[in-house]
Image (spheres, rainbow, N blue to C red):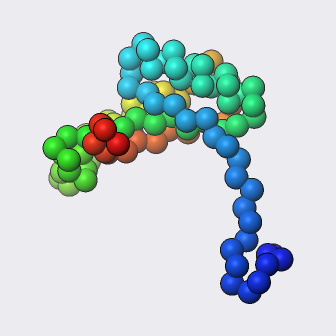
Amino acid sequence: MSSGPPGAAEEVEMVPSVVVGYDASQQSATAVRWAAREAARTGSPLLVVHVWGFAHQRTGGAGTSWLGAQVIAGVQAVADEGVAVALEAAPDVHARGSSATAHPRR
């Protein structure tokens, strides 16, 4: 329960996360392993992110068809692969993968 005025938002303790990008390259795997060990050292959760995009479209250019859904599932699989790399380096870390579509400059 909040101790502030009525309607005030409750304070939520934010646990800082370690966030790392992964694109299945050796360089990104090295970054994921480092991030996993850092997350384990600090007791922070780890978020492995794979971002992709094409033609500035909301779905990354994959579309909304069955084939588009398969492409998006494949993109998520890259993030999940990054989680597996993290767990090899730091088996006790709380890690999850996330994929997103965005323009490369964002």
Q: Nearer the viewer, residue 24 or 31?
A: 31
**Against 7, is 89 above or below?**
above
**Against 104, is 60 above or below?**
below
Q: Position of residue 17 (x, y in %)?
A: 63, 40
- Looking at the rendered image, the quarter that the N terminus falls into is bottom right
Q: Residue at x 42, y 13 (%)?
A: 26
**Image quadrant assignment for residue 19:** top right
Q: Is residue 80 visible?
A: no
Q: Residue at x 32, y 45 (%)?
A: 101
Q: Is residue 24 visible?
A: yes
Q: Residue at x 71, y 47 (%)?
A: 15
Q: Position of residue 42 (x, y in %)?
A: 75, 31
Residue 66 falls left or right of residue 13: left
Q: Residue at x 79, y 78 (%)?
A: 4
Residue 19 falls left or right of residue 37: left
Residue 31 falls left or right of residue 42: left
Check the image and name the residue furthest to the bottom: 6
**Image quadrant assignment for residue 44:** top right
Q: Nearer the viewer, residue 68 or 12?
A: 12
Q: Position of residue 102 (x, y in %)?
A: 31, 45
Q: How many marks?
A: 0
Q: Position of residue 76 (x, y in %)?
A: 39, 39
**Image quadrant assignment for residue 62:** top left
- Looking at the rendered image, the quarter that the C terminus falls into is top left
Residue 2 falls left or right of residue 84: right
**Against 74, is 58 above or below?**
below
